[in-house]
Amino acid sequence: MHWTYEPAMEQGVFPHEGGYTNDPRDPGGPTNWGITIFDARKYWKSDATAADVKAMPKSVAEAIYWPHYAVPLCYDDLPPGPDYAALDYSINSGVSRAAKVMQRLVGMNDVDGVIGPATIAAIGRRDPEALVNAICDERMAFLRSLKTFAAFGKGWTRRVTEVRALALHFADQAKHMAPPITPTQTDETMAKGVIPPPTATKKVIQVGGGGAAVGTAGGFHEWVIAHPVETGALALGIVVMIGGTIYAIDRNYQARQDAPTPGIVVVPEKAAA
């Protein structure tokens, strides 16, 4: 584990994320220590409730962050400064987006959100301080594009400003051992900086045909009993259709979430020594 990780979490992530929040305007829903109810159910308790999230020990969040946020970004292989800037971005707006932003900033042709040797090598050819500034500039541009910026923009702006300062401190500390910086504690709700997911809608599927008996509850019940094969095929078709619709919505949402921010500029490589 890289030397910047613990101070990044204790001086940056946890002070910024604070305690429990459940703002109806926040796409993350019930959140504690920066861990949403969705992550809690995915990595901690599959049936976690808002009350569970509210009572979540800090140790649970600590156990989630390293393997599910830091490791996918190859945190240990990133230079001091960009490591924390990317990590905090991923915690607030998603690992996939943070990874793709880094790839775009270093001019990768294959922007797939998977940080591997080629991306790490390209990052290593950039000045860490320039990359920190580029990550934070892109992040602010993305956050300003969100419709939730009016509600949470003040807190996000403060957070990114302080993330930039601490990340630049890490980059400088790697060279000169600069004195520590502690971000400001805030009571403002720190919502997730993501594109709000599509509003769930109820769809009523009407089944017709098969004679007049299908038109009544009793007739339909009799039709089901008399046509078990057709009933099974009908049920399977409905499941496939609903599953396909959900998959398409999810793919479209993820594409919007990870889309490039307009005007992004590739960070130039460092001049040869």
Image (cartoon, rainbow, N blue to C red):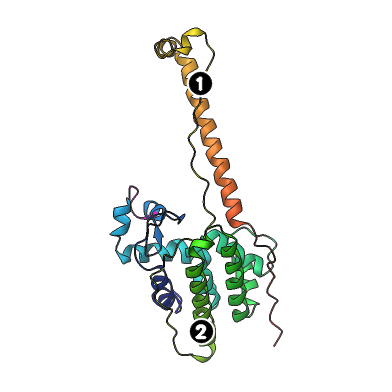
Q: Quadrant of the C terminus?
A: bottom right
Q: Amino acid at mark 1?
A: Ala
Front one among 155 and 9? 155
Q: Point out residue 213 in the picture as x, y percentages from the top left corner.
A: 46, 8
* Residue stretch in magenta: 43-48
- The kind of secondary structure element at disc 1 is helix
Q: Point out residue 50 in the picture as x, y percentages from the top left corner.
A: 33, 53
Query: In the picture provided, is 120 more to the left or to the right than 234?
Result: right
Q: Point out residue 69 in the picture as x, y percentages from the top left corner.
A: 47, 63
Residue 25, picture quadrant? bottom left
Q: Identify the residue at the far front of this view.
A: 150
Residue 113's place in the image compared with 170, above or below, is above
Where is mark 2, residue-wise? 169
Residue at 53% over, 69% down: 86
- Sequence-wise, the earlier of marks 1 and 2 is 2
Mark 1 vs mark 2: give the one in front: 2
Residue 250's place in the image compared with 16, above or below, is above
Q: Amino acid at mark 2?
A: His
- Mark 2, Cα crowd under 10 Å, few <14 / some 14-19 / many 20+, is many
Magenta residue check for 126: no
Where is mark 1, residue-wise? 233
Q: Quadrant of the N terminus?
A: bottom left
Visible residue check, residue 227: yes
Q: CA distance from mark 1 to mark 2?
A: 62 Å
- The kind of secondary structure element at disc 2 is helix
Residue at 65% over, 77% down: 125
Residue at 58% over, 67% down: 139
The dominant secondary structure in magenta is: loop
